[in-house]
Every structure is written in structure tokens, then in C-alpha cells.
Amino acid sequence: MPLAIIIIAFAVANRQVTTVSLDPFSAEHPAASLTLPLFALVIVLLVIGIVIGGIAAWLRQSKWRRTARRLEREIEDLHLEIQALKRTAGIPASSVNTPAQAPERLQLRAPMG
């Protein structure tokens, strides 16, 4: 709500029409120009900046996502190997933690003293 109030106040205070020229050679008669209120220009540029920043962050995190997927596959393979080894050793399959089962939680003792 406070952000909406700030944005509305900004829009009301900056209603002047601004021309954005995309032609570096002719300032008086640009081949490509855009005329819009100043607040709209600022908000559009802010949204574009957020989108570009989000894409850059997503691309930088791809290494970590790839590593997490690889480690999850390794964990699954190790669980299957443990199950196979316990079956060959004669240990009941019910005592084997499968990936679908949640691990047991640690129980903390009361502090002494």
C-alpha cells in the first residue's frame, strides 16, 4: 500500500509530456521518437531494469541449479545402492530409509546444570 501511494504521487507530480528521440543524427526531426508522460517513461524503464536484472540473476544461478540436480541424482543412486546392499546382507527392507521417507529428527537433551 505505501508503495502504491508513492507511485501514484510520483505519477501525479510528473504528468509532463516528454519526447524520447531514438535518432542520434536529427534532434529536431527524429526518424523514430516516442512521446509519453514522464512518469510512464520512468515506470517502463524501471520495469525493463527489473526484468533484465532478474534474467541476469537467473542465468548466474544456473551453475548452482545444475549442481543441485546432479547431487539429487547421486543421492537417489546411493539410496538404491544401500537398499541393494542391505537386501544382500539380509537386513529387512523396512529398515532402509528411502528418499520418500523423511529423516528422523535429532532429539535435544535439556541443558545440564
Image: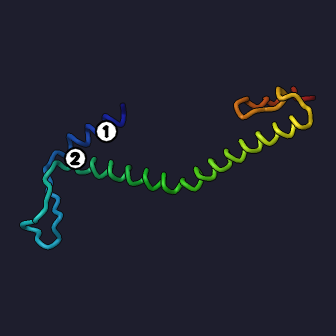
Q: Give the class, few, some or many, for how many residues have Cα within 10 Å of label 2's Cα (few <14, many ≥20).
A: some
Q: Which mark is residue 40?
A: 2
79 or 1, nearer to the observer: 79
16 or 83, nearer to the observer: 83
Mark 2–mark 1 distance (CA, rounded to whole Å): 14 Å
Given the current orientation, which residue lies at the most extreme bottom position?
A: 25
Amino acid under label 1?
Answer: Ile
Residue occupying image coordinates x 20% and y 50%: 38
Residue occupying image coordinates x 26% and y 43%: 10
Which residue in the structure is indicated by mark 1? 6
**Rendering coords of residue 106 (x, y %):** 81, 31
**Rendering coords of residue 45 (x, y %):** 29, 52
54 or 46, nearer to the observer: 54
Label located before the other in sequence (2 or 1): 1
Q: Give the class, few, some or many, for how many residues have Cα within 10 Å of label 1's Cα (few <14, many ≥20).
A: few
Query: Mark 1: which secondary structure?
Result: helix
**Rendering coords of residue 4 (x, y %):** 32, 35
Taking the image as drawn, is residue 63 in sight?
yes
Query: Mark 2: which secondary structure?
Result: helix
Residue 112, by quadrant, is top right
Amino acid under label 2?
Answer: Ala
Residue occupying image coordinates x 15% and y 54%: 18
Q: CB atoms at circles 2 and 1 under 8 Å apart? A: no
